Image: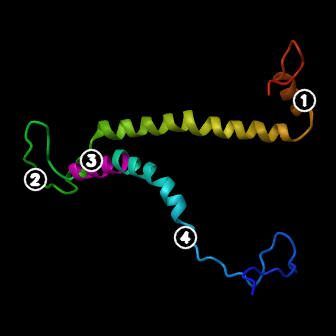
């Protein structure tokens, strides 16, 4: 009586035989691997970004200062005072204007130039000629 099966294989190479039982392997769920790799970054983000924001918001609802640590809750009174302050409203206006000028307008202008370069024509040729290397007539990009 032989303990080893000597019958010829009838299955194609690369596929397991149907009679062989599959080993039960404990597999991790699909979301566990990304969570393991993201955990250190999430921990740093929570400690250095979210926690200070929440603490600052909590302090903004009190009348705490550095010289008098005993704080009382004043609720939204600080925010009401802030919104009625002319210096704050002026600085908010200046910040909004600077944001429009420095962030929004260059992005819109860049997209406009990219759309103009997408269509062949006289403006296309002028813009391509103006952005090419004058010594080697190759584009900068």
The residue singled out by tag 4 in the image is 29
From the viewer's perspective, tell me whether residue 51 is left or right of residue 17. left
Work out how far the residue at label 1 is from the one at label 4, CA to CA, in angstroms: 55 Å
Q: Secondary structure at mark 1?
A: helix
**Compared with residue 113, is residue 23 higher up or lower down, i.e. above or below?**
below
Going from N to C along the chain, the mark reached first, 2 or 4, is 4
Does the magenta stretch mainly form a helix, a strand or a loop?
Answer: helix
CB-based contact (under 8 Å), mark 3 and mark 1 = no
Q: Secondary structure at mark 2?
A: loop
Work out how far the residue at label 3 is from the one at label 2, CA to CA, in angstroms: 15 Å
Query: Which mark identifies residue 72?
Result: 2
| Front in this rendered view, residue 20 or 28 | 20
Residue at (87%, 12%) from the top-left corner? 135
The residue singled out by tag 1 in the image is 125
Nearer the viewer's eye, disc 2 or disc 4?
4
The residue singled out by tag 3 in the image is 56
């Amino acid at each position: 009586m032989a303990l080893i099966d000597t019958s010829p294989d009838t299955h194609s190479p690369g596929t397991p035989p149907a009679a062989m039982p599959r080993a039960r392997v404990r597999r991790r769920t699909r979301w566990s691997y990304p969570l393991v790799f993201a955990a250190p970054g999430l921990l740093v983000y929570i400690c250095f970004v979210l926690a200070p924001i929440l603490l600052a918001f909590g302090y903004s609802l009190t009348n705490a200062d550095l010289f008098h640590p005993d704080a009382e809750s004043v609720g939204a009174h600080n925010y009401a005072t802030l919104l009625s302050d002319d210096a704050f409203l002026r600085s908010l206006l200046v910040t909004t204007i600077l944001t429009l000028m420095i962030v929004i307008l260059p992005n819109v202008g860049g997209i406009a130039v990219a759309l103009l370069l997408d269509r062949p024509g006289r403006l296309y040729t002028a813009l391509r000629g103006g952005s090419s290397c004058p010594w080697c007539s190759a584009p900068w990009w």
